[in-house]
Image: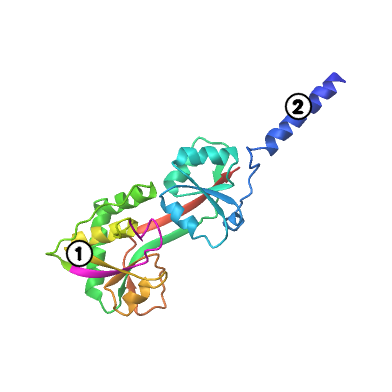
Amino acid sequence: MKRTLRAGLTALLFLLLLTSCGSGGGNKVYEVSDMAGKIVGVVSYTTSAGYIARFGEPVEIRYFDDAAQLKAALKAGSIDCALADPTVSRRLTRGSFSLRRLDDMFVDCDYRLAVSVENRELLANLNTALRSLSADGTADRIVDAWQSGEQASEHTPDPDRTPITVAIDPTFYPYAYYDGEGEPAGLEIDIVWAVCDKLGLTPEFVAAQPGMPLYLAEIGKTAFAIGRISLDPDNEAVSFTDAYMHCDEYVVVRK
């Protein structure tokens, strides 16, 4: 009788361990579409925070100071999943038997500059600058800084340089936004400044509604556009530069 009771208690304890994972219980997210209505954690001031804020489905977003806090919350079950770039997602899953990264990616895209198809000289110059930024590591340093939540760089216009107009969507933090002083800031802004430094130019940013920067480049209203620009092989009015960044965003869940 005692042996049967002990076996029963052991089985019950094992069942409780299997079915509990903090206050949130087991995994509830198996693909990106499952995130709707869930509690999603991100590290504050990162690109992941910008992406989840624009997710097309209603979610409750919780912000954390760093990857360690985010990992602890996910393991405890106080959030349903985490959204993270490659670096943070590795920190979440490294050495953990209880967390895993979904195969279904949240974001998988290239970022490019867009130029009117008629402006072949500018396209060639932009590509030359981007390749130089890639070769000397500048582009990677800018991207890594923003993905880890660092603040924007400061830029001082040079009145002796030729100005060039650039269309941006300033509503997508931390890629492009207006800082507390009303100046354009963000990952894309730092990329544009780096490109213009290579070419001896000074950027003049033109704010556009979401989805409109590409159109401003098409009609020649600005010299080029930057941002979440999708390659459209059927668009004969625009040419695209080499990619200056490939963006991966992963969903991390409990096993």
Q: Classify the position of the C terminus by image quarter.
A: top right
Name the mark on residue 202: 1
Residue 171 shown in magenta = yes
**Tag 1 secondary structure:** strand
Q: Where is residue 146 shown, x and y percent of the image?
A: 36, 50
Looking at the image, which residue is at 46% across and 58% down?
A: 108
As drawn, 79 above or below 190: above
Residue 92 shown in magenta = no
Looking at the image, which residue is at 14% across and 64% down?
A: 159
13 left or right, relative to 44: right
Among the 4 quarters of the image, the one containing residue 161? bottom left
What residue is disc 2 on? 10
- The answer to whether residue 201 is visible is yes
Mark 2, residues whose alpha carbon is within 10 Å: few (<14), some, or many (≥20)? few
As drawn, 228 above or below 37: below
Q: Classify the position of the N terminus by image quarter.
A: top right
Per the rendered image, the range of residues in magenta is: 163-179
**Tag 2 secondary structure:** helix
Q: Where is residue 212 shown, x and y percent of the image?
A: 39, 73
Looking at the image, which residue is at 15% across and 61% down?
A: 158
Q: Where is residue 162 shown, x and y percent of the image?
A: 16, 68
Q: Amino acid at mark 2?
A: Thr
Q: Kindly give the residue lying farthest to the front in the view shown.
A: 181
Q: Amino acid at mark 1?
A: Thr
Q: Kindly give the residue lying farthest to the left in the view shown.
A: 160
